[in-house]
Amino acid sequence: MSETKKDTSIKFVQCVASCSIALNLFLALNLYLGSSGKVINNQLSWSRLAAEEAELAASMDCSGHGRAYLDGFPIDGKPVCECNLCYGGPDCSEFSPDCPANASGGDPLFLEQFWREHAADSGILVAGWHRMSYSFSDQTYISQQLDAHIRKLHNVVGNAVTDGKFLVFGAGSTQLLYAAVHALSLPPDNTSSSSSPAQVVASIPYYALYEMQTDFFDSRESNFQGDAAILINNSDVTTNIIEFVTSPNNPDGQLNKPLLKGSNVKTIYDRAYFWPHFTAIPNPPAHEDLTIFTISKLTGHAGSRFGWALIKDERVYERMTRYMQLNSMGVSRDTQLRALKLLKVVLDGGGREIFKFGYEKMKKRWERLTNTLSLSNRFSLQKVSSQDCAFFRTPREPTPAYAWVKCEREDDEDCFEVMKSANIIGRAGAVFRADNHYVRLSLIRGDDDFDILINNLHKLVSEEGGVSETM
Amino acid sequence: MSETKKDTSIKFVQCVASCSIALNLFLALNLYLGSSGKVINNQLSWSRLAAEEAELAASMDCSGHGRAYLDGFPIDGKPVCECNLCYGGPDCSEFSPDCPANASGGDPLFLEQFWREHAADSGILVAGWHRMSYSFSDQTYISQQLDAHIRKLHNVVGNAVTDGKFLVFGAGSTQLLYAAVHALSLPPDNTSSSSSPAQVVASIPYYALYEMQTDFFDSRESNFQGDAAILINNSDVTTNIIEFVTSPNNPDGQLNKPLLKGSNVKTIYDRAYFWPHFTAIPNPPAHEDLTIFTISKLTGHAGSRFGWALIKDERVYERMTRYMQLNSMGVSRDTQLRALKLLKVVLDGGGREIFKFGYEKMKKRWERLTNTLSLSNRFSLQKVSSQDCAFFRTPREPTPAYAWVKCEREDDEDCFEVMKSANIIGRAGAVFRADNHYVRLSLIRGDDDFDILINNLHKLVSEEGGVSETM
């Protein structure tokens, strides 16, 4: 080797060595800092396995027509795609063209995409020893952090006054609706059990659960009496009356108000849909004796079973708390942890992001629906008046969660069946104690369900005659 | 530079370069493989933030007398220690010597350490979009994976036959106990609502919730009648009777059997404590019409609110399923996901690990308790006969969850007050409809609570006179 070659060789090797050392430094730093760039004391230790499992499930390719969950039945140790309705195959890519459109249930999957876009912020890692106790450290069943976030949320949205109100948590609004009936139907002094049972009513069309619960649980303190209208001119002021006011209403989206008044009338406001996705938020905010909310239609997490009641009267609060204690010892602490995380994401940036997402999604769906039905004389939609929205600070068209469709032809006596014969599964008017000329179509399900609904509706409307086949 | 020096220098630099390249490879592989050694396609992405939050909470130093949770109130963005009773200060290191021993509630924190030791296996990461739907893809509210793991668990433990049984999930056993009363008290044909209400009974001493639920929910179909013994010679076979059989019994740990028989008698077995932590598991396994279990006393996750019923009769199953639907639309899917993960850990290695941990812990506690009380003539403990255990395959002493203490002196008419004056909070016999010469002391709480209990008991016993102060 010549002197010059040796020198070049030394320089080359020196260069490789220093580059390599620099790369070492970079790699070691990368290991130390973690991919987030934040300095953490250690790499993840015990939490890594759970995180890997969740990322593996999330990474399964389901063609945009399904998703794999952590708790599905695995095949060969891998999570398996659970496909949307009408899609099948291992990766959900196989579409069944004759599959009916499901527009029946209120599964709020229209928000699923939002949560996928907020994956990093919305995940929670639950340690094996997380909150094993029956109660929180203040001896209640209620997370005070979650309580505070709920109050903040109402303040930001402007849909309800929480100052001076008590909060009770429940498994969705479901558990709270009957807890409220139970609490309000007890005689004021808890003693005069000889008084007649409270009469529970709601305005037709109404959510079927109110009647089913009161009938099924069959308490000595209450009976379901049906339509609130029949009690308008009732002069009996000795019997307690409990009126459900669903606002916006399920099925028709109207901002209902109580029909009944009087010292013997108590009102339960069911405000499951009182969020900017679905309705203008009027000013001033709701300030009622007993109002029930749920995350099901707010964040879309129906499966988590979480709701809350805002209660003015301390005695009613105590009875509902007692109901929750004896019925289930409160709401799962795992669910409360998750609801807290979800509400934190909702509150990020003053709630504008999720409500903009939800409203835009619903607006587009309503446009497609009204365009489709505009070609029809056979079917009509409910009219909901537009209002100023205190949250968006603009007037806006209402975008209810459900279409309340009327079959206008006299001989279309069963609108559910008319839809069914067109391969659309709605929910019959009779389920809401309304005329069967009506059918409810859910507009808050996943995109696939909605697309199939619009397709099948378009076909149905086209068959009325003379209507173009293009959409 | 001489030739030789230059050659040595080249060799040295070459060596550094090759070592450095090797280190590069090692570091890069480490980044690529992750700390678990499993090949993963990428470093953690969206899940990292949740994992970091959980590890931060877990890393807070609470001196072994508390723990920080993800959903506590943070200070300066950091999770805060929630201290065990009688401990305080920012790191829970401050002990309050005069603080009473809490031996009242059944908080099953005796298993907390087990879950800390199984941190990696027992964590779950819940994605923001996890199971938002009301139902699973089979349209039920029940995870089939969890159903399968529960059956496997009973098979491994040998405490209940699941073949041919239906499963219903509930929010702990709490929700299921009354769902069962409701289902069993309906008349067989669902029509004859004129038949008299079912009489609900249990053997004294009994768990107070049975009576509280039936009274509070006040269904037209059932009344609580108190002690089962009063109906033993009852000749009325037209009225339905529902007998709660708690086995092992709360409060006294006895393997109770039904007192009542007949075509009009239905039995609800509450088997919350029927696990190898607390009792020998007799052979053959339980094979009953309606049996209720919960994870509260199995894994110690009382806060998760998860239980299940094994049901033989399809109609009873359907009624309880209907109850769960109308009461809360099933159990939170978040809770079901967590219960699944916990049961997977329980089942690892055939369940031997958690039951060994639980039994050893309870055995040591019983030894300390009996040693302490052996010095006393004033207080006695329940006798529970030892039995062969089909799970451990050895005879074993019973280690009930609660001490059922009797104040033997005639004038100690209120044993709860005797304990209270010694700075011990138990639960009075009257709560279980028993004589107030009895008091229940919980033995399944956290180590700190148990240590304080033994200390205060020792002081109390020492004051009987002539007893050594050493423990």
Image (cartoon, coloured by chain):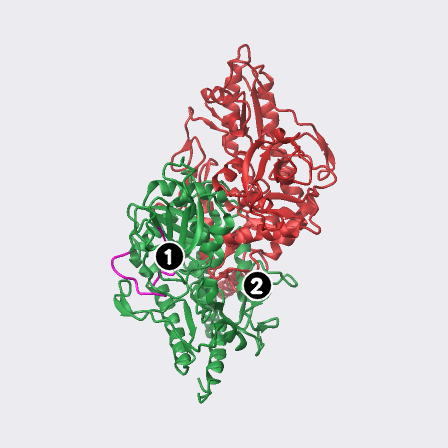
Chain colours: A red, B green
Residue B230: give its label.
1
* Left or right: where B155 falls relative to B459: left
Q: Are marks 1 and 2 in contact (CB under 8 Å)?
A: no
What amino acid is at disc 2? Ser
Asked whether B276 falls inside the magenta stretch, the response is: yes
> Looking at the rendering, in which quadrant would you find the C terminus of chain B?
bottom left
Q: Decide which of B379, B8 is in the foreground and name it.
A: B379
| Mark 2 secondary-structure assignment | loop
Over which residues does the magenta segment extend? B267-285
> Where is residue B79 drawn, in percent x and y?
59, 63
The residue type indicated by label 1 comes to: Ile
Query: Which image quarter: residue B423?
Result: bottom right
Of circles 1 and 2, the one toward us is 1
Q: Nearer the viewer, residue B18 or B364?
A: B364
Horizontal side, residue B219 vs residue B229: left or right: right
Residue at (47, 77) in percent of width and height = B411
